[in-house]
Image (tube, rainbow, N blue to C red):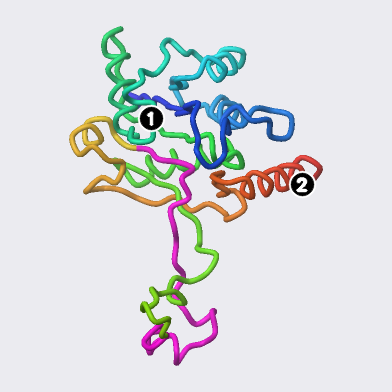
Amino acid sequence: MVDKILAIIPARAGSKRLPGKNSKQLCGKPLVKWTIEAAQQCESIDEIIVSTDSETIAEIAKDSGIPVPFLRPEEISGDTATAIDVVKHTIDYYQKIGRTFDYVLWLQPTSPLRSSTNIQEAIATLKTKSAEGVISVCECDHSPMWSNTLAQDGSMKNFLSNFVKKNPRSQALPTYYRLNGAIYIAKVEPLLAQETFFLEENLFSYVMSRESSIDIDHHLDFKLAEFLLTERTEN
């Protein structure tokens, strides 16, 4: 039997740092539409749903051919609501109408440069590794080995480790990766049981380029995404 994948695009109305960002126009499209279209182009996805508390975003999704069978209730629409709250609410809806899925694919609209190819490759990693979960990452812009906390008096004593002091060239340092927020996939049963996409067993990474990993949180992120998308479409 072929595993069934449910893609959830979470797109609530509120955003403190960049108000209305999910419906904000980015290179001629609402931000959320970039993720909707990337998901629609991925043949391995069986169902796509937009979970939102916004009538505006719901209309954008419906106009794109994506079902919005409900508006997200207030208790899972605020700043304290978690991804797992939204996943549980969505899975519960489908169970009530007699539909089940093997995997949940979580696609945040704040990653507009994540392509359908990225999504498909992450799903392929899931299958190749016989994994229960896959999470996307990218290389860190700067090695965290160059970072540390500061003492109250601003002293930099012991700021760098001896290893870094002896290997001042960045090329000599190990490569570090960070979460980029673009793709999370998890098998439904352990996801619900452990209440996290960071499953205890059989969890693997999918590495994306830093350019494709832009995560829009602030105005500057939005402008950078705008520049990169414009450059991509022109080339």
In the rendered structure, find residue 231 and report the number of the disc placed on it: 2
Q: Quadrant of residue 161?
A: bottom left
Q: Residue 194: x percent and y percent?
A: 20, 39
Q: Residue 103: x percent and y percent?
A: 33, 30
Q: Secondary structure at mark 1?
A: loop
Q: Residue at x 52, y 14 (%)?
A: 55
Q: Quadrant of residue 26?
A: top right
Q: Secondary structure at mark 2?
A: helix
Q: Residue 129: x percent and y percent?
A: 34, 47
Is 117 situated above or below 147? above
Q: Residue at x 36, y 24 (%)?
A: 4
Q: Residue at x 38, y 41 (%)?
A: 126
The magenta segment: 156-185
The single residue placed furthest to the top in the displayed view is: 97
In the rendered structure, find residue 78 and report the number of the disc placed on it: 1
Question: Which mark lies nearer to you, 2 or 1?
Answer: 1
